[in-house]
Image: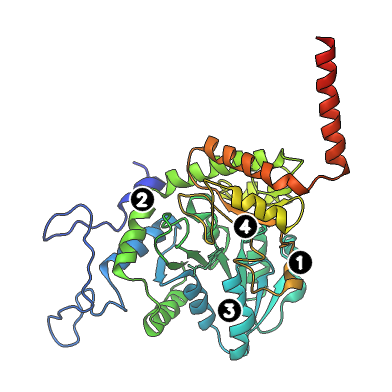
Amino acid sequence: MKKTQGFSTRAIHTGQETDPSTDAVIPPITLSTTYRMPAAGVVKKYDYTRLGNPNRSNMEAAVADLENAKYCCAFASGCSVTSAIINTLDSGTHIICVNDVYTGTHNILAKIAPKHQIQTSFVDMSIASNINQHFQSNTKLVWLETPTNPTMRITDIAEIAKYTHDHGSILVVDNTFLTPYFQNPLALGADIVMHSATKYINGHSDVLMGLALTNDETLYKNLVFIQASMGAVPSPFDSFLARRGMMTLAIRMKAHETNAQAVAQFLENQHRTVDQVFYPGLASHPQHHIAAKQQHGYGGMLSFKLKGNLDNVNAFLTSLKVFALAESLGGVESLVEVPSLMTHATIDPKERQALGITDTLIRMSVGIEDVEDLIEDLEQALGKSKIETKNVEDLIEDLDQALGKSKIETIV
Ligand code: P1T
């Protein structure tokens, strides 16, 4: 007999305990905020919903199983996980964080943590050894996002884990973009994995939730204490919805990846309108070799630089019919956004520029619609984007094409 069941079997069954009072296959939503005790201070399983709830336990058990983690704590959002992890640190400590990171994480580390004397160095980790010179005697935590949001840079998790542990720190990896289906940071040496479960884990853009996973009992106990004390917990209804969404994680992730690979290849061939495409599954991605080594697939996120300026970007965005112009990612529907004006607008413009987050960088969460419809939508919208971008090369290409056609006609 196989030791461990397959990914989808676990995604569907782990934590789904049959309700003993009705034998319902799908556990009901338990809305009660409080629970009877058999005697004063004796807790059978639950006492108060901030501290625990059957729907939340179900969700936590299932994700822990998929991430191969002993422990999982669910929070009210991805950002509340980040806050909880930072709250496990003492004041006076130092953090090293990858320089291209989700704005919410950046805000917590750069603007809130310093109020508690916790300082962060933001470092380019695309070459792992870069990190070495940034460790200080008080460095306690290294924070990674790979792929990064929104420029899709990849960091070698195992290499960073080695440097981190050599310096007596712990490594946190934000696995939101890839999910346990495509990447298992704990197996690569991470101490904590975090998710914005708002994205792929739930998968239907209707729940806000965050998750922290670990194999370390002390870290877990610290996180549970903060989860219970600070109270940023998900509701039973949200836990139910996210648990339901997670049942189809494997088939959704496969479909996201197939579509994203096709869209990335399509965009890479649009030389007239597209400057550069950032998708780790493309051979042209600068860290494709690292992604191929540590990931089991490349996921559904990509970004690209459109030729021209903000006018061209707006002409493109407003012409899209299937892709929705909206923040967030990881739902079944395709979304598109401009990080410099939307998700990453609060980052200092100079920092954004240095990271390549220009006004022509467009981020896409490729959904699981029929890929032909997605490509047709992009093709027509890119056509509209190019109205004012004609440069000398484009004009010569136009002339070349026209002259070619004229020749055929004269021969005929
Ligand atoms: O929105 P929330 O559930 O709090 O998750 C924060 C978060 C954490 N980590 C990553 C990698 C994320 O992408 C996010 C949220 N990101 C978006 C809302 C966005 O559009 O990029």
Residue named by callout 4: 147
Q: Can you tell which mark lies on residue 353?
A: 1
Mark 1 Cα shell of 10 Å, populated few (<14), some (14-19), many (≥20): few
Mark 3 Cα shell of 10 Å, populated few (<14), some (14-19), many (≥20): some
Quadrant placement of the C terminus? top right
Q: Is residue 70 left or right of residue 29?
A: right
- Give x and y (percent) for residue 389: 78, 48
Q: Nearer the viewer, residue 239 or 168?
A: 239
Q: Amino acid at mark 4?
A: Pro
Mark 2 Cα shell of 10 Å, populated few (<14), some (14-19), many (≥20): many
**Tag nearer the camera, 2 or 1:** 1
Secondary structure under badge 2? loop
Q: Is residue 359 left or right of residue 245?
A: right
* Label 3 C-beta lies within 8 Å of the nearest ligand 1 atom: no
* Mark 3 and mark 4 residues within 8 Å of each other at the beta carbon: no
Q: Is residue 212 left or right of residue 284?
A: left
Q: Residue furthest top?
A: 412
* Mark 2 and mark 4 residues within 8 Å of each other at the beta carbon: no
Of callouts 2 and 1, which one flags the residue occurring earlier in the amino acid sequence? 2
- Give x and y (percent) for residue 261: 60, 41
* Mark 2 and mark 1 residues within 8 Å of each other at the beta carbon: no
The residue lying at 53 percent from left, 59 percent from top is 326
Q: Amino acid at mark 2?
A: Met
- Give x and y (percent) for residue 245: 37, 54
**Tag nearer the camera, 3 or 4:** 3
* Label 4 C-beta lies within 8 Å of the nearest ligand 1 atom: no
The colour scheme used here is rainbow
Residue named by callout 3: 108
Residue at mark 3 to residue at mark 1: CA–CA distance: 21 Å
Q: Can you tell which mark lies on residue 247?
A: 2
